[in-house]
Image (tube, rainbow, N blue to C red):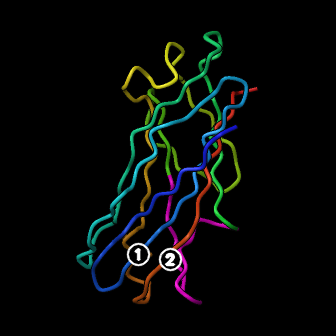
Amino acid sequence: MGAIHFFKIICLSGFTLIILFALVGLAIADVRISGFTDLNLGSWAGMGDLTDEMNLCVYNSDSLEPNYNITASGGGSFVLESGANQVAYVPAFKGSVGAYQDLTHGVAATFSEANHASDDCGGGTNANLRITVTEAALSAARAGSYSGVITVLLEPEP
């Protein structure tokens, strides 16, 4: 069984953004993801994006298969809500090789180089999850306290 980890992102400025995430690190056939922590987007000064990331460990016991899939979902889309108001955010993932790849809601994305030696990467990390609220989304948002949920699922590549 996997564990569900909750964390929040808080932005204190003209309005407050609070994101509650339920990230699922499932042990599916000896594949694990760990390292989820709280993210803090900081204060928005009226220009630029708000971005933060976390360092993760992705483990796969099958040393012959370095690739894995990440699928992200969040309700029906990646939005934060405050009453009837919404603001979109963009999740992106990066394995130990390559650049960040924006995640599409409900669509698996393949990454490479899972750790095969240790399910905690020997205390290190080999992947990153980044959350971005763009300047355009922030500029259009009404003041309020926004929240939402994202689920991140790790699976071995078939």
Vertical position of residue 45 compared to residue 73: above or below:
below
> In what element is the residue under mark 2?
strand
Label 1: few (<14), some or many (≥20) within 10 Å?
many
Q: Is residue 76 left or right of residue 119?
A: right
Label 2: few (<14), some or many (≥20) within 10 Å?
many
Q: Is residue 80 magenta?
A: yes
Q: Quadrant of the N terminus?
A: top right
User: Could you say which quadrant of the image residue 111 lies in?
Assistant: top right
Place of residue 96 in the rendered image (x, y in percent of width and height, measured from the top left): 44, 28
Place of residue 77 in the rendered image (x, y in percent of width and height, measured from the top left): 65, 66
Vertical position of residue 19 compared to residue 152: above or below:
below
Q: Earlier in the sequence, mark 1 or mark 2?
A: 1
- Give the magenta-colored segment's residue range: 76-91
Q: Residue furthest top?
A: 64
- The residues tagged by marks 1 and 2 sit, at their Cα atoms, a distance apart of 9 Å
Q: Main secondary structure of the magenta part?
A: strand
> Which residue has dot 1 on it?
17
Front residue of 99 and 28: 28
> Which residue has dot 2 on it?
87
Vertical position of residue 105 compared to residue 15: above or below:
above
- How many numbered marks, from 0 up? 2
> In what element is the residue under mark 1?
strand
Point 52% across, 84% down: residue = 82
Q: Amino acid at mark 1?
A: Leu
Point 65% across, 14% down: residue = 62
Q: Amino acid at mark 2?
A: Val
State yes or no: discs 1 and 2 in contact (Cβ < 8 Å): yes
Q: Is residue 136 magenta?
A: no
